[in-house]
Image (cartoon, rainbow, N blue to C red):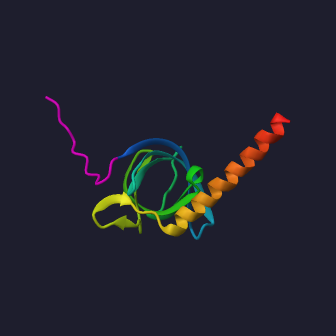
Amino acid sequence: MTTTIKDRRSTPRQKSFLQGRIYFNGRRSSADCLIRDITDAGARLRFSGSVTVPEVFELYIPNKQETLRAHIKWHRGDDVGVEFENVPRHVDSPQLVPSANALEERVSKLERELAALRRRFEADRE
């Protein structure tokens, strides 16, 4: 006899292997973590060893250059489930709706990176 557990997430979970860092205590304290699952609304974080994690903290994701305010929903062993606060959502959809400023900043950053790569490529060809 098998028992299935219903997934209570409102958005699909994406497996990940992202580096993360949490900041707390007025950003005077921090701890590294590994982001194992992530959705628009929350994540499962894994900490190495026993780390005391406060109820509310900032999660910085370097690969995405994104900082999200999070609070703990559950804690099992080295894993902590968090929910993100103040995540902008479209009324009819659980998907994130990025702000115009965030998109402009992202496009600008990508354009600068592309220009730098082109310069490097041209320099290597000479």
122 or 39, which is in the foreground? 122
Residue at image location 60% in from the left, 67% down from the top: 27
Front-most of 46 and 116? 116
In x, y percent, where is residue 48?
53, 44
| Residue 15 part of the magenta segment | no
Magenta highlight: main SS: loop
Q: Is residue 19 above or below residue 70?
A: above
Quadrant of the image occupied by residue 4: top left
Tell me, yes or no, if residue 81 can be seen here.
no
Left or right of 99? Residue 122 is right
Q: Which residue lies furthest to the left in this view?
A: 1
Residue occupying image coordinates x 45% and y 62%:
70
The residue depicted at 21 percent of the width and 45 percent of the height is 6
Closer to the camera, 49 or 105? 105
The answer to whether 65 is drawn above or below residue 49 in the figure is: below
**Magenta range:** 1-12
Instruction: Tell me the quarter of the picture where residue 26 sits.
Output: bottom right
Q: Is residue 26 left or right of residue 78?
A: right
Residue nearest the viewer, comparing 20 with 101: 101
Q: Residue at x 58, y 59 (%)?
A: 106
Point out the image quarter for the C terminus.
top right
Residue 73 is situated, as x and y percent measured from the top left of the image, at: 36, 58
Image quadrant in which the N terminus is located? top left
Q: From this viewpoint, is residue 111 visible?
A: yes
- Horizontally, residue 121 falls left or right of residue 77, namely right
